[in-house]
Amino acid sequence: MLGASTCQKKNQCIMSKLVLAILVFSLLTPVVACCQSAERIRIDSAKAKVLSYIKGDSAYMNTCFYIADQFMDIDMYDSAQIWLNEIASLVPIKKPTHFNFYLAVNQTITYYYNGLKQIGLKEGERALSIAKQLKDSIYLATAYNISGVFLMNSDSFSKSLSYFKEGIKYCRQPPYAPKYLVISKPHNLYGNLGELFLKMKKYDSARSRLLRSVQLASEIPSYRGVAAAQNLLGILAAEQGLYQDAIGYQHTALQLGLKHRQIDLALIAYGDLAECHQKINQSDSAVFFLKKGFELIQQQPTIINSFFKKDFLEDAIAVSDKINNGALLKEALAQKAALYAGQMDSYDKQVTLLVAASIGNETRAANLEIEDSKKAQSLANTRLIIVLLILISVIVLFLVTRYYHRRQLNEIEIRNRISRDLHDDIGASLSSMNIYGGLAASVWDTQPQESKKMLGKIADISRGLVDRMGDVVWSLKAADDGKQSIETRLRNYASELLSPKDIVCEFDIDEKIAAAITNPETKRNILLIAKEAINNIAKYSGATKAVVSLKQTEGKVFLTISDNGKGLPVENIKQGNGLQNMQQRSKQLNGQCTINSSPGKGVTISCVFPMATISYKP
């Protein structure tokens, strides 16, 4: 049987996913096509029409956005990215325009649905920056809403709350001018704010915002908005144990979804209704709604986005397992395995293209900056010849400019190298996920438990990949803020691994030295050395206390990680447990790593780096 907390965890997961998904799909053209072939007809028609426009004018750009939106509706994000790349090649990089804004918003959508949330969060902040420069209230409301949702799903509740409140200040009800292609309406913001309060366990505040969302969506009217808010009200009632009220809300969401062709929301409501009836021991009703959900998937296979289909199947697995319905459990596991197997065929290509697009945009911006630097250099040299009386001042200016130029080139080289490493890491992880997905699909009929284990491994690999991507994005930031310092990241990592083992971890980190680590490669290697050591302490040490220290002495930086555990035999010091990885990373930073230990006296890992290594070299 599944664990007792499965449904509760599922509710939290579905809440975090559903609202962003609703936001994203409400920003795009609503899903109203009867089949995928109809989408293809519209796409082919738009492709033919775009050839008649002048490349780069408003009609051309709007049609490119339309084609990208249509591809997103049918889960073809790689094809959508091709058209977004076409737009990116035409819009000015530094000048804020409404096309730049729409491009950033669409990019956040593609990154979210492909699991690239850290890159998506960065793109959402870029959309907010453009909206502020344009000083457009509708753009500001949309940007605050999108960034707020990404922050909420990253557990940054405080900042997310402030973003939603700011967005509400700027939003207003339709009608809007024709120029607004992508916007957030007031009911979107109130619905997201209600979902945030729900995650924060502030139930009264959540209910009042969700009811306000229902009211605002009804005024337009937006049946999708009403159904989404009703679904969240049902989840809120279920979380408070008010299952009859929850059933009423979910029935409303279901009827609206079926009547107004919001099939994905209807499917979600079927899953939630099954769960509510299971909670009150009405197994027959739970089975009824699960079967209705499976019928809906069979009837509308091309309309329902895989994002929503996966959520329903997770509901079906949890509920059918609790009511001991082997047939439904088998069906749900089979469909989920098939869904993952189908996604694996295209996921590698899609993610590779999306990451490449992100790197390409960054590279294009960096090349433009290099060209600007070269022009500034040429101008400085010309002035050097003309203004002979201030020769010394011009030479100093030239040297400073050259230093800055070389620093930029060094940063670009490091970013490109890390990007290649990240691409290789993604490829290896996706290959593993593909293998596990194939194994899960092959044994779902004979060994359903083994299938679940394989799916669990896929989830573990996905989380690990996101964590590693987070480390890379963090290492590329120019400077740390209080919430993203190396000490904060290590404290969070140590708390996650060591606290369950009752191991107390103390930190003695010189903030000035930590702030001086500006070289992205150095930041990443130091972080990974410390994380490897903490991981080994959690797995093997049997310690009660660990200490992480980062200090500077006589022009050198010392990183020390020690514990009071059982230690290592002498013969094991040079092999295993990631020790060789730490030594290799130290060599890459022109430093050295020594490991001192003996049985019963703990382990001390000492790494020494030259001060010049931790920042950019001129």
Image (tube, rainbow, N blue to C red):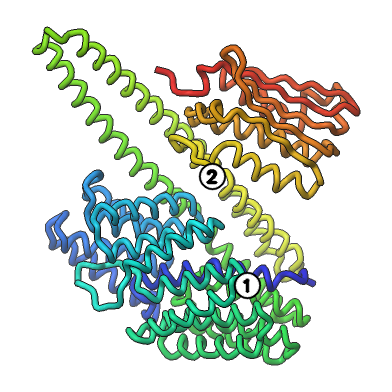
> Does 470 sit above or below residue 300?
above
Residue 284, percent from left and from top = 71, 92
Taking depth in this image into account, of 113 and 534 the one nearest to the observer is 534
Label 2 residue SS: loop
- In this rendering, would 184 be left or right of 295? left
Number of numbered discs visible in the structure rendering: 2
> Does 246 sit above or below residue 160?
below
Q: Quadrant of the N terminus?
A: bottom right
Label 1 residue SS: helix
Residue 391, percent from left and from top = 17, 8
Residue 275, percent from left and from top = 66, 81
> Does 137 sit above or below residue 175?
above
Q: Residue at x 47, y 82 (%)?
A: 211
The numbered dot on residue 11 is 1
Three-letter code, disc 2: Lys
- In this rendering, would 547 be left or right of 513? right
Q: Residue at x 38, y 86 (%)?
A: 218
The answer to whether one can see residue 419 in this image is yes
Residue ranking furthest to the right: 600
Q: Residue at x 24, y 57 (%)?
A: 135
